[in-house]
Structure formats: structure tokens, C-alpha cells
Amino acid sequence: SVRVQHEPAGGPAANRSTVSASPDQSGTFTITGVVPGRFRLSASVSPPGPDSTWATLSSQVDGQEALVTPFEIRADRQPSSVVVTLTDKPAEVSGKLVDPADRPVAGMTVALFPTDRTKWVANSSRVNRTTRSGADGTYRFASTLPGEYYLVVLADLDSNVWSDPAVKDQLVTAAVKIVVAKSEKKTLDMKLPGGGR
């Protein structure tokens, strides 16, 4: 069961709720009641289940990326081409944090954000992501979009300032640059000097 979500991302439609639709057997979907504004377009498969790995790989509106970067709906013009692509082999980034004695380091914040600075303010769960290392020192970013990223390990990170591009700019110097290919399972283990950043 696939649902295509049309999510407000600012402008006149910002206070409206996300609307969705289910494609027919040919994969065609129609979302009604759309008002002018800025939106993102994604899809989900339900029920997710323990073995389901489906994720949105990309969405395009009139040839422009629309999964992370908002697109605009205007009152005087309808989009002429809308395509959402799903994958059952999404990429992911994972690894393990250890101290100089190779002991696991738990509770560290691991941040993953794109090298494309235009996406640093994107309010999307698919980019600009953080997680914490587990008791065994491992971390994981499931359903990672293909692309080039910075990955940085921190003792802590204030979620209230995470959306500020100036904060990410400061983190770049301490980050590792990685490239994630389509369907790639990238592993990046890191030894932390002194058990921290």
C-alpha cells in the first residue's frame, strides 16, 4: 500500500496539513484540493513491517528535485510532470565508535548533513540527520539518499540550533566527507581520541 504525501513547506500553504493519495495499478496518482504554496513530495509504503525496506528514492516536479527542495504550486499553472520513485534497496550509513583502547563509545551524537549548502536548512527527515551511538558504540542512518555528505561526531548537539547553517558551517572542519551511492551500505567506523570529538 503506497501513499504519496504532499507536504507544505512554507508560503501561503504553510499552515495546511499534509495531504496524500494512493496510486492506482498503473502507478498514477491524483492529489486534489491543492492550494498555491511551497511543497515537498514523498511516498511511503505501509504497513512497514520488520522486513520492509521501501523508501522514496527521488521525486521530481517538472524535472526539478522535490523530495528535499520545496517546489512551488502557482494558481495560474499546474505541474505538467510529477514522478515519484521508490526503492526497496535504500542506501544507509552505519559504523561503530570506539576509544583509543578500542572500547565502544556510547551516547555520542553523530550528525550527517549534505555538502550542498543549499540543503542545510531543509526540514526533511532524509537529510540533516542526527542519531546517538548505542551501548555497543554503533550508529546507523537508514534510508540515506544518494549523495555527498559530511559526517561528524559530537559529545552533544543542541537540537534547537541544528537547523542553523552557521552551526553546520562550524562543524565542517571536524567532519569527514563521504559519498553514498545508490543502494550502498556504507560502513564508517571511527576511533575517537579521548572518547569524544
Image (cartoon, rainbow, N blue to C red):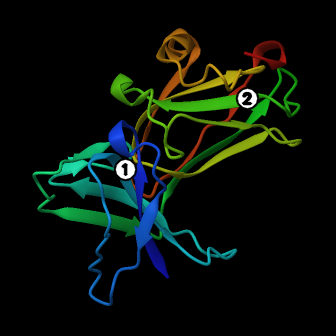
**Does residue 69 appear in the picture of this structure?**
no
Q: Callout 2: helix, strand or loop? A: strand
- In the image shown, does 89 or 43 lie closer to the viewer? 43
Q: Which mark is residue 96?
A: none
Choose top left, top right, bottom left or bottom right for residue 101.
top right
Question: Left or right of 39: which side holds 176?
Answer: right
Q: Amino acid type of disc 2?
A: Thr
As helix, strand or loop, the secondary structure at mark 1 comes to strand
Type of amino acid under label 1: Arg
List the residue tagged with mark 2: 109
Residue 77 lies left or right of residue 17; in this view the side is left
Residue 34 x %, y %: 30, 60
Q: Which residue is mark 1?
A: 40
Nearest the camera: 48 or 18? 18
121 is higher (above) or lower (below) than 92: above
Q: Which residue is located at x 45 percent, y 73 percent?
A: 3
User: Looking at the picture, how far across and down is residue 5, in whole percent?
Assistant: 43, 63
20 or 111, which lies in front?
20
Label 1 Cα neighbours within 10 Å, binned few <14 / some 14-19 / many ≥20: many
- Horizontally, residue 33 falls left or right of residue 133, namely left
Q: Looking at the picture, does residue 92 appear above or below residue 195?
A: below
- Residue 11 or residue 160, whichever sits in front: 11
Residue in the image at 72% along x and 42% along y:
139
